[in-house]
Amino acid sequence: MKKRTNYVTVFLLTLSAVLFAGLLTLFVLSAASSSPAVPAGEAQPLTIAEKIPEGSVPSAGLPDSAGDDLSTAGTADTGKTVSAAEDTVSVTLAFAGDLLFDENYAAGTALRSRGVTGCFDEAALDVMRSADLFMVNNEFCYMDEGTPLPDKQYTLHAKTDTAVWLEDIGADLVSIANNHVYDYGEDGLLNTLHTLESIGMPYVGAGRNIDEAARPYILETGGMKIAILCATQIERYPVPDTKGATADSPGVFRVYDMTPLYDKVREVRQTADFVIVYIHWGNEKESLPVAAQTDSAKELEAAGADLVIGDHPHVLQPVSFINEMPVFYSMGNFLFTSYKTDTGLASITLDTKAKKISNVRFIPMRQENTALHLLTGDDKQQLLQKMQAMSQDVMIDADGNIQKRP
């Protein structure tokens, strides 16, 4: 009886083991069928938690792909390219005049001692930084050491570490087609190019050869292609201090004879929806444009330009229209000296669907005590009235919006 009992016990234990093994096999097969197969020899994919180091995930969670920034930047054969979302409806471009970081002069000294926020008020910085593109004239070269041109009366340079101030004020693009970027000769120009490139600041109007100097900056947004050309007409004599670029030597895009600029506008017009010319021209301290400006503006419009922005006179000059093309003949000094100077921004809003200008505006500012302020109240209205008085063929309203006079 005892031996029979032992047989039953062994049988039951064996049956239990078989059943347990069967259940375990079914569980393993089920788990395997619910996960993707990993080929032999390959590692199992990491989980999200394993891919992202601890503490690197924002407290609000991972970014939603639908809200990601679609903008990308790169270099194209025709200049710098920024691509934005195709559903963009409008883009705002802001243009300022002459800027100086040279610490041998009041503007550079003030920026070094007080910083950007001590030289630009918050309201002005907000306007500058909020533009989709903000452009200014970099009227000096970047050079820590070296020798200035021996026979030039005024030579301007700034330390290379000041270039980041451009980023601090919100600049997206600088003009270096002017009569001071070559003040320390070829070395000064080449060092300026290197310095700007080292901080990722796009520039137009000068380069290591004429192809680079005459190359436009390209902004692509909302399906609209915008080209910005930059050139200088200053030092209007055969042998200038500021060298023009050639096929194999560095310099500025010099247009003592404007024909190369007209030709470049025509060339760029073939592929761009909107062409802007930012040009160094006119006579210093004269509040009215000279014939060289007005005649050239007409030719630029005929060549296909859609907007002209001028600088160099160091004072504001009139706003005008040639057919449908706005011309700001001079934006004056931006932050350049210590004395009181009226200035401002040319603000242009483009409709990217219609591929044309939807609004033209002058934003009044003032440079005073080596600081720039956005004007409001009576000061704003007085400067707008001043601009209206000198700009006879346009109408400027109380907020600076500009329309062509019928």
Image (cartoon, rainbow, N blue to C red):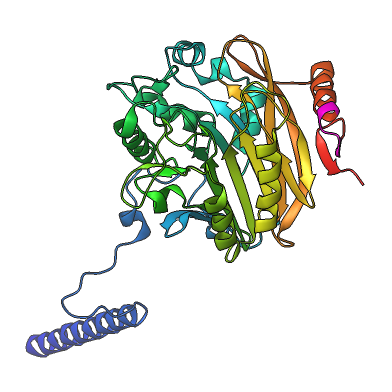
Can see residue 206? yes
Q: Nearer the viewer, residue 36 or 21?
A: 36
Residue drawn at point x = 63 percent, y = 22 percent: 122
Q: Is residue 254 above or below residue 38?
A: above
- Residue 108 location (% of width, % of height): 47, 16
Q: Which image quadrant is residue 343 in? A: top right
Q: List x then y, in percent, for residue 363.
A: 73, 31
In front here: 71 or 403? 403
Q: Residue at image x 18%, y 80%?
A: 40
Confirm whether the magenta stretch covers residue 159. Answer: no
The residue nearer to you, when weighing 27 against 170, is 170
Seen in the picture, residue 115 relative to 351 is either above or below; the reply is above
Residue 176 falls left or right of residue 398:
left
Q: Does residue 367 appear left or right of residue 386 in this picture?
A: left
Q: Give the magenta range.
A: 389-395
**Residue 306 visible in this rendered orientation of the protein:** no
